[in-house]
Image (cartoon, helix red, strand yellow):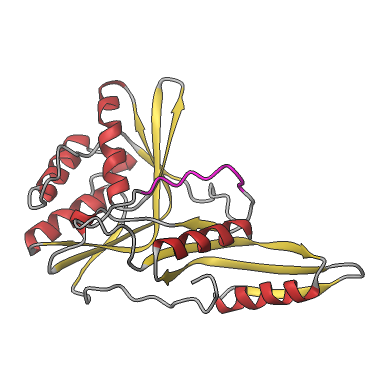
Amino acid sequence: MNLFPGKTVSGTALAVLFGLALLALPCTGTVTAADGHSHDHAGHDHAGHDHAGHDHAGHSHSRDSAGGGHNHPEVIAFRMRDWKELHFNDPQKAEGHVQALRRLGCEARLDQHAEHTDVVFRNVEWKQITVESHAAAGRWEKWLKNSGFDVWHGHIDERLLHGPEAVEFRQTEWKTLHFDGERARDQQQITTALKQLGCDVRQERHGDHDDVTFRCPVWSTIRVEDHTTAERWMTWLKGAGFENRHTHPPSTRQSRRPDSDLR
């Protein structure tokens, strides 16, 4: 069922399906989906450029019911589409940096010059690492951004992390929903919903309408109580433009752990 015929959202259908998907979840409140129309932002991503003070991550930080905070593994994804150069006056630091990049699976090399060394690298496709804690994730996120990577670090709402049925989803490129007229009232609700899924979310005003732009570039997993609820989520995610699949993986998501002191 395609809810974006001609890339125009069937807002009523999408809202109904999202409401049905949430019926089995505890304490979900009144979050619903939004009307509007969408367009992809392929080629509109600024990977490979430094964005100091320009991070638009909109992820939420859900905590467990016991108030334990973030003492659990977290996933970080990163990408560098174009070649980037970093200049080092210290050749040992340059060597250490290039080795760290190679351990992460990046293409990386050293270019020696008379008075400095360049580390030249790229990572065209999204890669992900799992670190042991929220503090370690923060250190990795800072290191990756300082190196120029496009970084995703999302947190799925705690209410969507339990249950025997798993739905996996991703949206590798930025996608935008437009909110104008009567649809404007749904903007906050859809923004909240996307953040509950761990997406990066941007909100911008353009003339007579608002845009909500989102992505979730690596496969993420929500867990629900039964197959029917899983099917409802898959229909909603497909309508919102996500890739999705229904799986039965083990309770912990596995990913290659980085070999670094930043852990």
Name which quarter of the figure residue 7 lies in.
top left
**8 or 108, which is in the foreground?**
108
Is residue 184 shown above or below 141?
Answer: above
Q: Quadrant of residue 91?
A: bottom right
Residue at image position (31%, 57%) is: 69
Q: Position of residue 244 (x, y in %)?
A: 27, 61
- Highlighted magenta segment, given as a residue range: 51-59
Residue 54 colored magenta? yes
- In the picture, measured across the screen, residue 120 lies left or right of residue 40, that is right
Is 151 drawn above or below residue 99 in the view shown? above
Counting from the top left corner in percent of width and height, residue 51 is at 60, 47
* Count of numbered circles in the view: 0
Give the x, y percent position of residue 210: 39, 28
**Residue nearest the viewer, comparing 93 with 101:** 93
- What secondary structure is the stretch in magenta mostly built from? loop
Magenta span contains residue 67: no
Residue at image location 13% in from the left, 40% down from the top: 16
Asked if residue 239 is positioned above or below residue 109 in the image, the reply reads above
